[in-house]
Image (cartoon, rainbow, N blue to C red):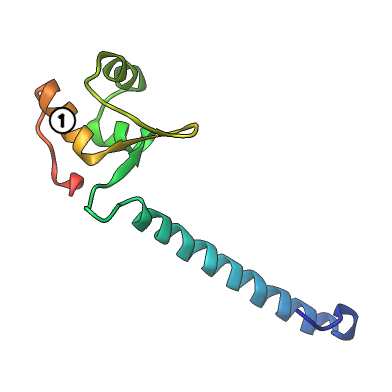
Amino acid sequence: MAQVLTSYSESEFKELLSNEVRSAVREALSGESKEKQASQNHSGIGYRTRPETRKLLGIAYSTMHYWEKAGILVPHRIGRKVFFSDQAIREALSKAGKEANNDLG
């Protein structure tokens, strides 16, 4: 957008703006998929957020909190964010006497 905006007609400006918005949305969407891929390190260990882990385990937030305090489910904290590795989820399932499903890779 190096050109002066006043040199565009209204229709040209709308077209330029819509193209820029489309480009930004595509970039944002591709960035999300890259972030999800980056959540797996080189050894293939995936990390999941609290809501993802809770849904995967089929437990309530209060149960998840209890499991964390009891050492059944070990969280990994990065700043204020909390993640759970697939390995930690498998171990929690075995400690709780549940069976792991195929969603854990």
Task: Locate residue 45 relative to residue 7 in the image: left or right.
Answer: left
Secondary structure beneath dot 1 equals: helix
Residue under label 1, please give it. 91
Residue 38 percent coordinates (x, y): 37, 55
Q: Describe residue 64's horizontal placement relative to residue 92 as left or right.
A: right
Q: From what the image shows, is residue 61 above or below residue 76?
A: above
Spot occupied by residue 34 in the image (x, y as percentages of width and height):
41, 61
Q: Position of residue 99 (x, y in %)?
A: 9, 33
Q: Residue at x 60, y 72 (%)?
A: 22
Q: 55 or 39: nearer the eye?
A: 39
Q: Nearer the viewer, residue 30 or 68?
A: 68
Q: Quadrant of residue 14?
A: bottom right
Identify which residue is drawn at 31% across, 22% down. Answer: 64
Q: Amino acid at mark 1?
A: Glu
Place of residue 74 in the rendered image (x, y in percent of width and height, measured from the top left)? 27, 27
| Residue located farthest toward the right when viewing the structure as drawn | 6
Q: Is residue 9 above or below residue 68?
A: below
